[in-house]
Image (tube, grey):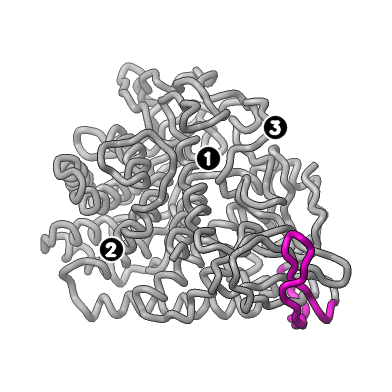
Amino acid sequence: MNINKYHIFINQTGYLPNAVKTAYMAFPAEEFSVCDCGGRTVLTGRTERFGFDSLSGDTVFTADFSSLEKSGKYYISAAGKRSAEFVISEDVYRKNAEMLLHAFYYLRCGCELEPEYAGEFVHKKCHTAPAAEWYDHSVTRDICGGWHDAGDYGRYVTAGAAALQHMLLGCRLFPERFYRLKSNIPPCGKLPDILAECKVELDWIMKMQREDGAVYHKATTAHHAPFIMPEDDTAQMYLLPVSSMAAADTAAVMALASGIYREFDGEYADKLLKAAEKSYKWLENNPDFLGFDNPEGCGTGVYGERGDKDNRFWAAAELFGVTGEEKYHRDFRALLDEDFPKTALGFGEVGGMGALAYILSAGGDDTIKNRLKKNFSEKAAELKSLSDSCGYGTAMTGRAFCWGSNMNVLKSAMTFIIAAELCGEREYIPYAQKQLDYIYGANALGISYVTGAGEYSVKYPHYRPADADRIDRCHEGFVSGGANGRPCDEKAIKLIPEGTPPMKCFVDEVECYSLNEITIYWNSPAVFAAAWLSE
């Protein structure tokens, strides 16, 4: 069992020298000390009583040690208790971002993972056989490639597009930070590692596009595989029916990518743009919402949505940004007042992605851009209020502790960064950091939700290869779903007592998929935030 022996909770990976640094404890203490690893006290201070925190059920005390800026390795002690060790270093967030990015290599489908890049976590080629259309098995297609989406071996277009957007947005906004990340992956021409990794998924999504521009919603077997290695999952792979969300998200992310890759490979950029225009043409010819639900006999992830207006909004914005064509501008404006959130950055709600694409476009209407920026500013202010009211500094409500709650934490970090950079509100930088502090251990359980990151981190994620490979050590760099106040898997329901505060509704068990699964679109906002904070 994974048991935490510490009682003072900090970001276990560490802090930048000039960053705000806060430790949290759920016991009374008037004073605290920061010690180096030789036991020598380097800083003392008085704690501050935050008070009762409803999300954790704790009466929280905090210790501010921001004045300690000297690089080194330390721990904190108070009232006879201590924290895990952590570092203060200029490169702590860059290393975090690189670990998070490298996790995508472990998720590559259709290829062998080699020792040079995967270490001991190797496996043979997987899922290379042609996939058959669900309703017409005589129609087959090569859809080899991409990333396994999560703890299972399915591949889902809308989920992949969201993960790509998070990382490609970072490349567009802050190329110097993102292009310097080293991920230890096979080289791909002159592409920076992050673009080489994203190309794996972009190429797969293009394989999911039909000749008419429609896009299959997902590629999975009929049911999730048991806990076996990916190369042992030899059941028939199926192409599940097209959806308008998949087509719109494909148009959007291909357009976004085309503008970024053009600096490195004009021919590939043209291919991406052609794919974007093809799917957008299909959307024009099919204006009605075409949703998705699993057909009878299919039991893999659904990724359903209740509408596609925000998806079309994103597609129009990205294509307007890269082409400047008025028809895309017209379509974007026509959707501007539709009732969907314009700051949402998840796979199921993508209005914020469309807003950002328009804000960053060379043309467009400055009045609209300012309106969209104001939305992000107001959202950041709302999240700041939540952070200030939480004993552990996380910008969450009780309901936000759901399946994949850590994505909500990380989307808040993205929003704070966007408000800081695009709205000029630099006061949100420490709030972005607080969200990553939470992910890396500054939370009510004192657990780092990133595998292999910190002394007390997740070790048993719901991820098939981690269980099937019979290797004691876990793959590094995966973000766990996190605390879930409404667990829905049998073991989590059994292990978590009714009435447990939402921030404490977590156990590190492989069977607890509603708490401890991993997925690409939980890692991607973490890459965005960690890479941005690296400078």
Q: Amino acid at mark 1?
A: Ala
The first of marks 2 and 1 along the sequence is: 1
- Point 33% across, 59% down: residue: 176
Q: Amino acid at mark 3?
A: Asp
* Secondary structure type for disc 1: loop
Q: Of the residues tagged 2 and 3, which is closer to the observer?
A: 3
Q: Amino acid at mark 2?
A: Ala
* Secondary structure type for disc 2: helix
Q: Is residue 40 magenta?
A: yes
List x then y, in percent, for residue 190: 25, 42
Left/right of residue 279 with respect to residue 90 in the rendered view: left
The first of marks 1 and 3 along the sequence is: 1
- Point 46% across, 62% down: residue: 534
List x then y, in percent, for residue 371: 31, 79
What residue is shown with label 3? Answer: 472
**Residue 1 in which image quadrant:** top right
Q: Of the residues tagged 1 and 3, which is closer to the observer?
A: 3
Up-down: is 306 above or below 210? below
- Please identify the residue farthest to the right as the structure is shown: 80
| Residue 209 visible, this angle | yes
Pointer 2 local density, CA inside 10 Å: few below 14, some 14–19, many at least 20? many
* Secondary structure type for disc 3: loop
Up-down: is 528 above or below 16? above
Q: Which residues are magenta?
A: 29-55
What residue is shown with label 2? Answer: 357
Closest to the observer, 438 or 236: 438
